[in-house]
Image (cartoon, helix red, strand yellow):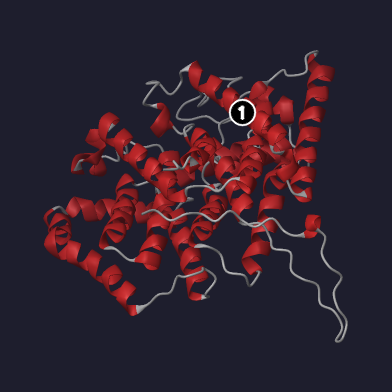
Amino acid sequence: MKISLRFRHVLPILLVLLTDRAFTEFVIAYPDDPRLGLYNYAITGFSLLFIALYFRQLSSLMRRWLLVLVAAVGLLALESYSGWGTPFVYLHVFAKLLALLPIFALYGYYRQHPLPMGLLMVLVLVGLATSLALFHPDALSLTAFLDTERGFDVTSALLLLLPALYYFNQYLLRGGLLRLAVFFGILALIVFLQHRTVWLTTALALALNLLLIVTHRVEGLRLSTHRLTPLLLLPGLVLALGGTALVLDNPLVLRKLESNVADITNADKQGTGSWRLRQMEAYLPFVEEHPVAGMRLEGFELPVQFYGDGDRPVWADRTGHHFHSFYFDRLFYFGILGVLLVLAVPIWQLLKRARQPAPLSPDTAVLLCFSACALLYGFSYDWPPYLYGIMGLTLAVAPPLRMPARHPAGSLPAPLRVADTPVPSPALPLPA
């Protein structure tokens, strides 16, 4: 009997996902432990190794993008040596560029090796659920909900969206009430954790996924009656059995939900949205003074400009400025060029693939929708390290297809060389 070793192909993406706090908490109790920084350095080394091993798998566009990234790091090192006498004076700033390396590492790896998607989703879901149950069991109580004691960081709550999308598509493809129940269970947990940004990104990702389905862009998925009926009836059945009583017997729950919705609709006046707005206003003059390439290393030396209640800065100087926005962070440190360095290629490539008539596999649609919702997530938070890994995986399994050229009637196209044929996307397996 031949033993399949395909499960090993889940390890590279899993190593990147393990940078999330929900997983590191199994080993390191304190979020400020310096060993967490060492693991991020290890991910950088792992990425460089994989880039070297799978460089031939990078497309020409990905190679050019990597070359631009290397040039940006090199110029920053020259600036550091010229102004401070050492090539890497503030690693905090360099890390914002090196965070892109997992994109190329996982792109190269998963262009050659298929990902066991079902196994990855099981591991992610079991890991997140175990972390929440072991380390934050109190966060699952009604009291914790009313007191906004979330238990999970926003990055961990966002990661829940990945298996939610997966099991939704698997239900539409293969049916099964268990898959449907897992989807609704994850969705309920996302709502319960009360990270409002994750609420919005979840809504966007599901809307994009449904748009792909109704426009027949996902292979094998159709909104048929025998799939839609349980999808609509199961939430109503749960509410009838116990959910309605929970809300009616505890009007504070309803008020809490109303307060969360109000924080979303009035983000500039209340909640954490107003806090982010005040932070941006404090730094906006510096962004406007350096719009193209940002402040870079001088930005790290800039004293903290954001003050809380009283006259004390929110963070200590020389620890970074901790922007709660991916876009504002990149604009401050690297300007418009820094934003384009991260987003230009993925947006171009994924939009190009989404517009092509060839259907996507259900698993590829999951990764594409999850990656797309990162654009909305970036308005409220900086991207976590694992998002760059997922972006590389998405680009690997959803490359734009090379469409055959049109030829005049009666003429025959020249035969394609082997090197001209597109590398097929890995066929992502379905769980049993």
The quarter of the picture where the N terminus appears is top left
Residue at (11%, 55%) from the top-left corner?
Answer: 249
Q: As shown in the figure, which amino acid type bears the numbered disc 1?
A: Phe
Label 1 Cα neighbours within 10 Å, binned few <14 / some 14-19 / many ≥20: some
Give the answer, above or below, for where 136 lies relative to 380: above
Find residue 401 and report its image quarter. bottom right
Q: Is residue 285 visible?
A: no
Q: Residue furthest bottom?
A: 409
Residue at (47%, 54%) from the top-left corner?
Answer: 429
Seen from the viewer's position, the closer of residues 398 and 24 is 398
Q: Residue 217 vs residue 174: left or right? A: right
Residue at (36%, 63%) from the top-left corner?
Answer: 171
Q: Residue 73 vs residue 185: left or right? A: right
Q: Which residue is mark 1?
A: 46
Provide residue 8's location: percent of width, then percent of height: 49, 37
Residue at (68%, 41%) from the top-left corner?
Answer: 331
